[in-house]
Image (cartoon, helix red, strand yellow):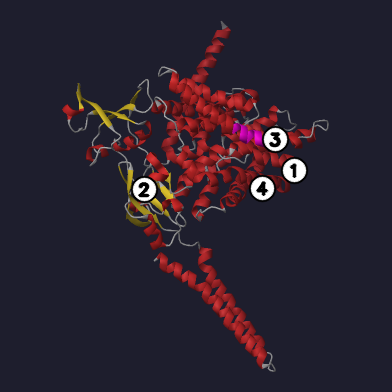
């Protein structure tokens, strides 16, 4: 009987933790607090140093639960990512997830060795553990702040955050092997297997993830799963892909993200309801994982590591991450503001704490050091960076209003096909559908619920507020339809962008000749509308941009599926060092000329040849100063 009471108390505690976490997430959205920090705080309050005093010290359970939770989070991130978005930012995102992680880990290791005094292997292992960013934390805070980022910043951060974990995991595992060798002289040298491990992590992980995604799509299109079983099957399949990859020494993180990417970009039955289920599953995974990590840590034991961890966190935020981003984005066309913001959005989170459990599981001597340091680094990052992401975006003028519609939508599954979804919307006063001058060609009205009656679209006539409209729509167009029925949406306007506005029937070739920018050959015979259609297909949205040589074209108005108006976005004014450089050169040249005149005056017997050389040098220096000044004046005129 006593055992039954204990079990019921455990069940009650677990349910109460979930309820408390959900309620706290509502408060986090309202007050802009980092969600993951709230969940960590709940775990720490419930832990052995908190008022509840629960004792939890099983790193193997933490590893298993963390693996499953991260698989769910990354799979959901892949499902919500469009391939067209990844294609436009693949190169810089890949550079950030490889070169950026390497540079960040290396610099943090050097700092830990020379400033903190750790050994080289311990220092680099610590740097690898805290080198990757956390996608879930970053995008929850941006969404909670109602922000949408300009340009390529948002897609780059999303893709980098989802793909940099494999590099951090590889570095951690490789350095952990070296640490075990140094701790045990009889252990085998891991040098020979390090390169093989690297290719296994990336190549095999990509292969398993892509194949698993296509197999999952094939099963969903042929198996008559009921609406309730379908999302559960997809969730379990994602964890299967993750664990199979891990068993084969491949990157489960990369595999499960790519599987979600394949699934999200293929026609799948009941996809909107599947997304809703994955959204709830992702929140639950974050809640369970971070509450568990909060339970695992003992705050009283972290006091000895707090000062050291804060030093590492500050160096990571202000030096290591910015230099890693600068090294990664240098070959690409990013403005100073974009580079600064990508540097600041180096939020540490779940993966860093998860990786810090690996030395403990490997029984590395002194492994508790890594977990305590990583935990404090994550706390500092969530507090310092997490609370300022929206403010920083606005200060750097990279923030746009969030145009994601907050609309009620109801989906009805149509078994036997994946090309159309049956959706319903409540018609509210002020929604764009009531005032639209056209009906999209891909939208097929089915019937209308008006009052207590169900009437055909012919009998109902135009929709009125209070109606419920039912439509057949392709799955990829549902987000576009959401915007038409959102009465509270604030659409992007031309005033939200800086540049010159053009209608989409203008030929790109003529625009390139007028504004002197390079144009790829495939665009030379196309209009602006045709170029956007070729680049984005049927997933075009307001704010999408066509990247050209030195300028960008931004879609600011749509007519159905076609862009109708664009902005030719102007380049930013040069930063202050570029503006003052010509004046500094002029002052230096004047000082040199004055110094030569003074030296000439000290030499009364100077020959005519020497006098001529001095005059020629004066003329040359003055010409250089004028040349340096003219571009600055030209830039100023262009800006005006």
Residue placed most toward the observer, 306 or 401: 401
Vertical side of 414 occupied by 346: above or below: below
Considering only order in the chain, which callout, 3 or 2, is on the residue closer to the N terminus? Answer: 3
Residue 204 belongs to magenta span: yes
Q: Nearer the viewer, mark 4 or mark 2?
A: 2
* Mark in front: 3 vs 1: 3
Of mark 1 and mark 2, the one earlier in the sequence is: 1
Q: Where's the N terminus, which quadrant? A: top right
Q: Nearer the viewer, residue 443 or 435?
A: 443
Task: Read off the residue under disc 2.
Answer: 530
Local secondary structure at mark 1: helix
Give the mark nearer the N terminus: 3 vs 1: 1
The segment highlighted magenta reads 197-205
Among numbered discs 4 and 2, the one appearing first in the sequence? 4
Q: Which percent across, then down, holds residue 410?
A: 33, 26
- Please tell me whether mark 3 sits on a helix, a strand or a loop: helix
Left or right, 185 with respect to 294, comes to right
Number of numbered discs visible in the structure rendering = 4
Tag in front: 2 or 3:
2
């Amino acid at each position: 009987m006593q055992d039954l009471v204990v079990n019921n108390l455990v069940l009650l505690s677990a349910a109460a933790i979930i309820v408390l976490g959900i309620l706290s997430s509502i408060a986090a959205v309202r007050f802009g607090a980092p969600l993951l920090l709230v969940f960590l705080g709940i775990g720490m309050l419930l832990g052995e140093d908190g008022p509840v005093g629960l004792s939890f010290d099983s790193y193997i359970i933490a590893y298993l639960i963390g693996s499953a939770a991260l698989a769910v989070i990354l799979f959901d991130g892949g499902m919500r990512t469009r391939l067209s978005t990844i294609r436009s930012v693949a190169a810089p995102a890949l550079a950030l997830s490889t070169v950026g992680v390497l540079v960040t880990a290396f610099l943090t290791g050097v700092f830990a060795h020379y400033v903190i005094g750790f050994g080289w292997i311990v220092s680099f292992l610590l740097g690898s553990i805290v080198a990757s960013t956390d996608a879930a934390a970053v995008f929850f805070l941006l969404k909670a702040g109602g922000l949408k980022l300009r340009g390529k910043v948002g897609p780059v951060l999303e893709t980098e955050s989802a793909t940099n974990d494999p590099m951090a995991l590889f570095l951690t595992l490789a350095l952990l092997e070296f640490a075990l060798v140094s701790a045990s002289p009889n252990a085998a040298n891991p040098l020979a297997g390090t390169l093989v491990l690297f290719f296994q992590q990336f190549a095999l992980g990509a292969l398993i993830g892509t194949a698993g995604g296509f197999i999952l799509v094939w099963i969903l299109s042929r198996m008559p799963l009921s609406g309730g079983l379908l999302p559960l099957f997809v969730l379990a399949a994602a964890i299967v892909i993750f664990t199979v990859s891990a068993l084969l020494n491949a990157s489960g993180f990369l595999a499960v993200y790519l599987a979600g990417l394949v699934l999200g970009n293929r026609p799948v039955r009941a996809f909107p309801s599947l997304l809703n289920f994955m959204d709830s599953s992702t929140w639950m995974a974050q809640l369970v994982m971070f509450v568990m990590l909060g339970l695992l840590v003992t705050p009283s034991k972290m006091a000895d590591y707090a000062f050291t961890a804060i030093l590492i966190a500050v160096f990571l935020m202000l030096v290591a991450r910015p230099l890693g981003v600068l090294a990664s984005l240098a070959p690409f066309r990013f403005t100073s503001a974009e580079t600064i913001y990508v540097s600041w959005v180096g939020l540490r989170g779940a993966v860093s704490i998860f990786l810090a459990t690996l030395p403990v599981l490997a029984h590395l001597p002194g492994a508790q050091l890594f977990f305590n340091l990583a935990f404090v680094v994550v706390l500092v990052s969530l507090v310092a960076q997490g609370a300022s992401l929206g403010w920083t975006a606005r200060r750097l003028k990279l923030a746009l209003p969030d145009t994601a519609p907050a609309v009620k939508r109801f989906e009805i599954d149509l078994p036997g096909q994946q090309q159309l979804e049956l959706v319903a919307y409540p018609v509210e006063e002020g929604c764009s559908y009531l005032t639209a001058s056209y009906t999209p060609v891909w939208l097929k009205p089915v019937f209308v619920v008006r009052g207590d009656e169900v009437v055909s679209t012919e009998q109902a006539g135009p929709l009125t507020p209070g109606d419920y409209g039912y439509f057949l729509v392709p799955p990829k167009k549902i987000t576009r339809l959401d915007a038409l029925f959102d009465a509270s949406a604030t659409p992007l306007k031309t005033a939200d962008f800086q540049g010159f506005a053009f209608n989409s029937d203008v030929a790109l070739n003529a625009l390139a000749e007028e504004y002197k920018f390079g144009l790829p050959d495939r665009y030379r015979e196309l209009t602006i509308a045709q170029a956007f259609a070729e680049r984005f297909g049927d997933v075009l949205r307001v704010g999408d941009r066509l990247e050209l040589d030195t300028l960008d074209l931004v879609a600011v108005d749509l007519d159905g599926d076609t862009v109708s108006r664009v902005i030719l976005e102007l380049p930013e004014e040069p930063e202050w060092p570029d503006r003052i450089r010509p004046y500094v050169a002029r002052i230096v040249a004047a000082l040199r000329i004055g110094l030569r005149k003074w030296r000439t005056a000290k030499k009364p017997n100077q020959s005519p040849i020497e006098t001529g050389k001095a005059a020629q040098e004066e003329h040359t220096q003055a010409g250089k100063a004028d040349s340096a000044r003219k571009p600055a004046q030209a830039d100023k005129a262009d800006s005006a």
